[in-house]
Amino acid sequence: MTTNKIQTSKSKSSSLSFLNYIPKFLKLLLNLMRDSRVSATDKAILGATIAYLINPVDIVPDWIPFLGMVDDIYLVALALLRLLLRTDEKVLAQYWDGPEELVPLLKQIADWAVAFLPPRVRRALLAKVENA
């Protein structure tokens, strides 16, 4: 098997695994919206993220197999990574009911999702996240 086929296979299995987390992330986002320990700015970002997830019109339409969900999961990961930088991890952990630890999972998802972005956009986003 060639390297490209192996990477594609790993990428597809990762994507299916990550996509299974979307309902758990949505539940986490909704709970964080109600928590008084989350700032108004972060709640606005969470609200916009939730609206984007439930809106049928996306940057990449959800009906496109695989790629349609990449933008959703990446946006959730970015919103939650921002919260990690600005909110006590205990608050996030209180509402997380996934089988894995939240912080490493979010970092893994963000790394995975950025691979699908154009190189110029990827560099710009990673620079912002790494500087934060």
Image: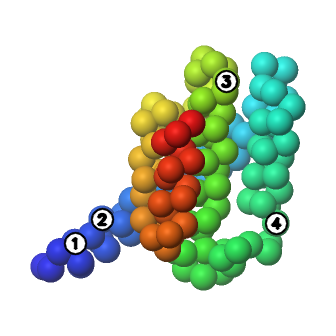
Numbered label attached to residue 70: none
Q: Which residue is mark 3?
A: 87
Q: Which mark is residue 10?
A: 2
Task: Answer with the quarter of the image where residue 10 lies.
Answer: bottom left
Q: Disc 2 or 4, which lies upstream in sequence?
A: 2
Q: Are marks 2 and 4 in contact (CB under 8 Å)?
A: no
How far apart are the alpha carbons under marks 2 and 4? Answer: 29 Å
**Between marks 1 and 3, how big is the CA–CA gap?**
38 Å
How much space separates mark 4 and mark 3, taking CA atoms?
27 Å
Element at badge 4? Answer: loop
Residue 28, how many percent across, how many down? Answer: 68, 37
Mark 1 vs 4: CB contact within 8 A? no
Q: Is residue 107 visible?
A: yes
| Amino acid type shown at disc 1 | Ile
User: Does residue 123 appear left or right of residue 5 in this picture?
Assistant: right
- Label number found at residue 6: 1
Instruction: Tell which circle, 1 or 4, labels the residue nearer the N-terminal end.
Output: 1
Q: In the image, which disc is placed on residue 55?
A: 4
